Amino acid sequence: MTETQEHRSWLRLLCDLNAAIGGTVLLAMAAMTVVSVIGRAFFAHPILGDVELVQLGCAVVVSSFLPYTQLHKANIIVDFFTQNASARSQRLMDALGCALYTLVMALIVWRVAVGAIDMRAAGERSMLMDLPLWWPYVLMLPGFALCVAIGAQQTLQLLKGGAEGEAA
Protein backbone atom coordinates (compact mmCIF):
# COMPACT_ATOMS: atom_id res chain seq x y z
CA MET A 1 0.00 0.00 0.00
CA THR A 2 1.46 3.36 -1.01
CA GLU A 3 1.55 6.32 1.33
CA THR A 4 -1.19 8.07 -0.67
CA GLN A 5 -3.42 4.99 -0.51
CA GLU A 6 -2.81 4.76 3.24
CA HIS A 7 -3.88 8.40 3.67
CA ARG A 8 -6.99 7.71 1.60
CA SER A 9 -7.93 4.67 3.69
CA TRP A 10 -7.54 6.72 6.89
CA LEU A 11 -9.70 9.48 5.43
CA ARG A 12 -12.33 6.92 4.45
CA LEU A 13 -12.27 5.35 7.93
CA LEU A 14 -12.56 8.74 9.64
CA CYS A 15 -15.40 9.75 7.31
CA ASP A 16 -17.29 6.55 7.99
CA LEU A 17 -16.80 6.98 11.75
CA ASN A 18 -17.86 10.63 11.60
CA ALA A 19 -20.97 9.77 9.55
CA ALA A 20 -21.83 6.95 11.96
CA ILE A 21 -21.63 9.37 14.88
CA GLY A 22 -23.81 11.83 12.98
CA GLY A 23 -26.31 9.09 12.20
CA THR A 24 -26.42 8.04 15.83
CA VAL A 25 -27.08 11.63 16.94
CA LEU A 26 -29.78 11.96 14.27
CA LEU A 27 -31.49 8.75 15.40
CA ALA A 28 -31.32 9.88 19.03
CA MET A 29 -32.91 13.21 18.10
CA ALA A 30 -35.66 11.45 16.15
CA ALA A 31 -36.38 9.07 19.04
CA MET A 32 -36.42 11.96 21.52
CA THR A 33 -38.81 13.89 19.29
CA VAL A 34 -41.17 10.90 19.06
CA VAL A 35 -41.10 10.44 22.84
CA SER A 36 -41.67 14.16 23.39
CA VAL A 37 -44.62 14.28 20.97
CA ILE A 38 -46.20 11.21 22.58
CA GLY A 39 -45.59 12.71 26.01
CA ARG A 40 -47.17 15.99 24.94
CA ALA A 41 -50.17 14.35 23.23
CA PHE A 42 -51.06 11.69 25.80
CA PHE A 43 -49.60 12.83 29.11
CA ALA A 44 -49.30 16.62 28.75
CA HIS A 45 -45.58 16.28 29.56
CA PRO A 46 -43.20 16.77 26.64
CA ILE A 47 -39.45 16.48 27.12
CA LEU A 48 -38.24 19.77 28.52
CA GLY A 49 -35.83 21.39 26.07
CA ASP A 50 -36.47 18.99 23.21
CA VAL A 51 -36.39 21.81 20.67
CA GLU A 52 -33.10 23.08 22.13
CA LEU A 53 -31.56 19.64 21.86
CA VAL A 54 -32.72 19.22 18.26
CA GLN A 55 -31.30 22.63 17.32
CA LEU A 56 -27.93 21.86 18.90
CA GLY A 57 -27.90 18.32 17.51
CA CYS A 58 -28.69 19.41 13.95
CA ALA A 59 -25.51 21.47 13.75
CA VAL A 60 -23.47 18.48 14.90
CA VAL A 61 -25.25 16.14 12.47
CA VAL A 62 -24.65 18.38 9.46
CA SER A 63 -20.98 18.77 10.26
CA SER A 64 -20.72 15.00 10.68
CA PHE A 65 -22.17 14.22 7.25
CA LEU A 66 -20.28 16.86 5.24
CA PRO A 67 -16.95 14.96 5.11
CA TYR A 68 -18.66 11.82 3.82
CA THR A 69 -20.39 13.86 1.14
CA GLN A 70 -17.13 15.48 0.05
CA LEU A 71 -15.25 12.20 0.11
CA HIS A 72 -17.74 10.65 -2.29
CA LYS A 73 -17.95 13.81 -4.42
CA ALA A 74 -21.68 13.97 -3.73
CA ASN A 75 -21.93 17.74 -3.35
CA ILE A 76 -24.07 19.49 -5.94
CA ILE A 77 -22.09 20.82 -8.89
CA VAL A 78 -23.22 22.82 -11.88
CA ASP A 79 -21.43 21.59 -14.97
CA PHE A 80 -23.73 23.07 -17.61
CA PHE A 81 -21.06 25.48 -18.84
CA THR A 82 -18.12 23.10 -18.55
CA GLN A 83 -19.51 19.82 -19.90
CA ASN A 84 -18.00 20.46 -23.35
CA ALA A 85 -14.59 21.51 -22.03
CA SER A 86 -11.59 19.22 -22.42
CA ALA A 87 -10.85 16.68 -19.70
CA ARG A 88 -7.76 18.68 -18.65
CA SER A 89 -9.79 21.92 -18.40
CA GLN A 90 -12.51 20.20 -16.40
CA ARG A 91 -9.92 18.70 -14.04
CA LEU A 92 -8.29 22.11 -13.49
CA MET A 93 -11.68 23.75 -12.85
CA ASP A 94 -12.53 20.92 -10.47
CA ALA A 95 -9.20 21.48 -8.71
CA LEU A 96 -9.98 25.20 -8.39
CA GLY A 97 -13.45 24.44 -7.02
CA CYS A 98 -12.05 21.88 -4.61
CA ALA A 99 -9.37 24.33 -3.46
CA LEU A 100 -12.00 27.02 -2.86
CA TYR A 101 -14.14 24.52 -0.94
CA THR A 102 -11.12 23.61 1.18
CA LEU A 103 -10.33 27.25 1.92
CA VAL A 104 -13.92 27.99 2.89
CA MET A 105 -14.01 24.95 5.16
CA ALA A 106 -10.73 26.06 6.76
CA LEU A 107 -12.31 29.45 7.38
CA ILE A 108 -15.32 27.74 8.95
CA VAL A 109 -13.05 25.64 11.20
CA TRP A 110 -11.29 28.79 12.36
CA ARG A 111 -14.50 30.73 13.02
CA VAL A 112 -16.28 27.84 14.75
CA ALA A 113 -13.23 27.36 17.00
CA VAL A 114 -13.19 31.08 17.82
CA GLY A 115 -16.94 30.91 18.45
CA ALA A 116 -16.49 27.99 20.84
CA ILE A 117 -13.78 29.82 22.75
CA ASP A 118 -15.88 32.99 22.96
CA MET A 119 -19.02 31.09 24.01
CA ARG A 120 -17.10 29.30 26.73
CA ALA A 121 -15.47 32.49 27.96
CA ALA A 122 -18.83 34.28 28.05
CA GLY A 123 -20.46 31.35 29.82
CA GLU A 124 -23.36 31.26 27.33
CA ARG A 125 -25.92 28.59 28.11
CA SER A 126 -29.15 27.34 26.58
CA MET A 127 -32.33 28.84 27.95
CA LEU A 128 -34.32 25.84 29.14
CA MET A 129 -31.76 23.13 29.83
CA ASP A 130 -28.90 25.40 30.87
CA LEU A 131 -26.45 23.50 28.64
CA PRO A 132 -23.16 25.19 27.71
CA LEU A 133 -23.57 26.46 24.14
CA TRP A 134 -19.91 25.93 23.32
CA TRP A 135 -20.32 22.14 23.39
CA PRO A 136 -21.94 21.81 19.96
CA TYR A 137 -19.34 24.17 18.51
CA VAL A 138 -16.56 21.88 19.69
CA LEU A 139 -18.46 18.83 18.41
CA MET A 140 -18.69 20.41 14.94
CA LEU A 141 -14.93 20.95 14.63
CA PRO A 142 -13.85 17.37 13.80
CA GLY A 143 -16.26 17.15 10.86
CA PHE A 144 -15.26 20.51 9.44
CA ALA A 145 -11.55 19.76 9.94
CA LEU A 146 -12.01 16.44 8.16
CA CYS A 147 -13.59 18.33 5.25
CA VAL A 148 -10.42 20.41 5.03
CA ALA A 149 -8.22 17.30 4.96
CA ILE A 150 -10.36 15.64 2.30
CA GLY A 151 -10.55 18.78 0.19
CA ALA A 152 -6.77 19.23 0.35
CA GLN A 153 -6.21 15.59 -0.65
CA GLN A 154 -8.66 15.86 -3.54
CA THR A 155 -7.20 19.16 -4.73
CA LEU A 156 -3.69 17.72 -4.77
CA GLN A 157 -4.90 14.62 -6.58
CA LEU A 158 -6.64 16.71 -9.23
CA LEU A 159 -3.57 18.91 -9.71
CA LYS A 160 -1.41 15.80 -10.11
CA GLY A 161 -3.75 14.66 -12.85
CA GLY A 162 -5.54 11.97 -10.87
CA ALA A 163 -8.98 10.71 -11.69
CA GLU A 164 -11.52 13.23 -10.36
CA GLY A 165 -9.59 13.86 -7.15
CA GLU A 166 -10.91 10.69 -5.58
CA ALA A 167 -9.80 10.74 -1.94
CA ALA A 168 -11.26 7.37 -1.13
Image (cartoon, rainbow, N blue to C red):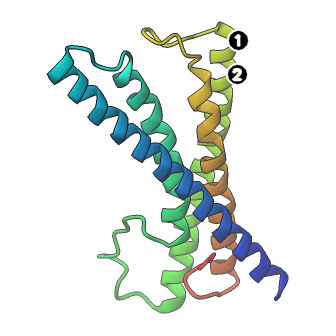
- Mark 2 and mark 1 in contact (Cβ < 8 Å)? yes
Q: Nearer the viewer, residue 16 or 63?
A: 16
**Marking on residue 117:** 2
Disc 2 secondary structure class? helix
User: Disc 1 and disc 2: Cα gap in Å?
Assistant: 6 Å
Residue 7 location (% of width, % of height):
77, 73
Rendered-image quadrant of the C terminus:
bottom right
Any part of residue 111 in sight: no
Image height of 158 relative to 48, above or below: below
Asked whether, in this view, residue 72 is left or right of residue 122, the answer is left
Q: Nearer the viewer, residue 131 or 141?
A: 131
Q: Nearer the viewer, residue 50 or 139?
A: 50
| Residue 114 falls in image quadrant | top right
**Marking on residue 121:** 1
Rendered-image quadrant of the N terminus:
bottom right
Image height of 44 relative to 146, above or below: above
Within 10 Å of the Cα at label 2, are there few (<14), some (14-19), or many (20+) other Cα atoms?
some
Any part of residue 69 in sight: yes
Residue 111 location (% of width, % of height):
62, 33
